[in-house]
Amino acid sequence: MKNLLGLLISVALGILIVLALDVSESFPDFGSVEVSERVAEEYFDEDNVNEVGSGNIVTAVVVGYRGFDTLGEVTVLFISALGVALIIGSSKNQKRLDLKFKPNFMLKTGSRIVFGIILITSLYIITHGHLTPGGGFPGGAMIASGMLLLYLADDEFRSNIKGFKILEGLAGSLFVVIGLLGLLLATYFLQNFLPTGAVGDLLSAGIVPIIYILIGLKVGSEISGVIDNFLTEEESA
Amino acid sequence: MIQYIAIILFVFGLYGLLTNRNVIKMIISLNIMEIGLFIFIISVGFVYDGIAPIISSTADLGLLYVDPLPQALVLTAIVIGVGTTALALAFAKSIHNKYNTFNLDEVEEKL
């Protein structure tokens, strides 16, 4: 009975959404959007592109035009990592969960080699965030996935969680410091005060790659901390 | 077409959220709803024959690009989604530690 009611409500809502969007005049048909009539037109303006200097327009929007929004986003991630640590508990005598099998030597060594490759790729993605698809958030998530691999492949591995906490705090503070430097050296918070260079060069776009590197370090260390919190438990001694 | 798939995913997630009483399954339903929304928002900015909004020099500016703004907004939303999922899973773990079950009905009986 409950399932039937849920099904009815879901199907009714789906039909309602489809009908409302189908009838609406202002909602464009799929694929036939006029980008030149939207805000996006401004992002592709030559003067604006030279002002931000980022070849990847999505990065220009996320870190350049909406940098303050990204600061809030990083803060939300920080608060959720803090909440996980508070709920699951991070007292001193934590021990990590046991694996259900005994990892052999080959698995441990092989996972360390793969971890190196993952780390190099994620650093490439982070530093090229203003030129290629990617950036701080996917790169940071890749660093954390490498840490998860080490946790799953080695039953004695435990990351230096204190170092991650320090790195995370440092990267977050530097983000705010760069924003305040923009306020001091230029006119408003998070304004670009460095030369932007030529679009498409690695050393271009002023503060955008610096902020994305800081975001990558912060996201990577935060999600690694969350993984450590999930894979440890209080010692029941 | 892809917009219908996105709406169907959203409705699937809502159905799972309404009918399941298992905390983990509820969190996964919430994630499916999120993914449907992300696909829908990105599809709003799609243009036929448009290419990814990445330029290698200012000479490329005349080409036809897809709308970068929905992609940037979805990037923000994905990160928030990761944060809320991690927090929800932490709640689920602490529920399991205390009541030894993930089912909310059984938790209510033990209250």
Image (cartoon, rainbow, N blue to C red):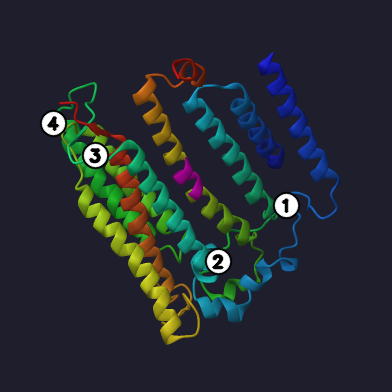
Query: Disc 2 or 1, which lies upstream in sequence?
Result: 1
Name which residue type carries label 4: Phe
Rendered residue at 33%/36% (across/down): A88
Q: Dot 1 falls on which chain?
A: A
Q: Is residue A228 above or below residue A202?
A: above
Principal secondary structure, stretch drawn in magenta: helix
* Outermost residue to the top: A1
Q: Between residues A110 and A236, which one lies in front from this camera angle?
A: A236
Q: Quadrant of the C terminus of chain A?
A: top left
Q: Between residues A13 and A92, which one lies in front from this camera angle?
A: A92
* Labels 3, 2: one chain: yes
Rendered residue at 45%/46% (across/down): B83
Secondary structure of the residue carrying tag 4 is: helix
The answer to the question of whether label 4 and label 2 lie on touching residues, with beta carbons closer than 8 A, is no
Residue indicated by mark 2: A61
Name which residue type carries label 1: Gly
Expressed as whole percent of the image width and height from the top left, the position of residue A87 reads 36, 38
Q: Between residues A203 and A69, which one lies in front from this camera angle?
A: A69
Expressed as whole percent of the image width and height from the top left, the position of residue B8 reads 68, 33
Q: Dot 3 falls on which chain?
A: A
| Number of marks in the rendered image | 4
Q: Residue A150, which numbered label?
A: 3
Q: To which quarter of the image does residue A147 belong?
A: top left
Residue indicated by mark 1: A31
Expressed as whole percent of the image width and height from the top left, the position of residue B54 reads 54, 64
Magenta extent = B80-84
**Front disc: 4 or 2:** 2
Residue indicated by mark 4: A105
Q: Residues within 10 Å of mark 2 (few under 14, many from 20)?
A: many
* Labels 1, 3: one chain: yes
Give how far apart the Cα atoms at labels 3 and 2 are.
34 Å
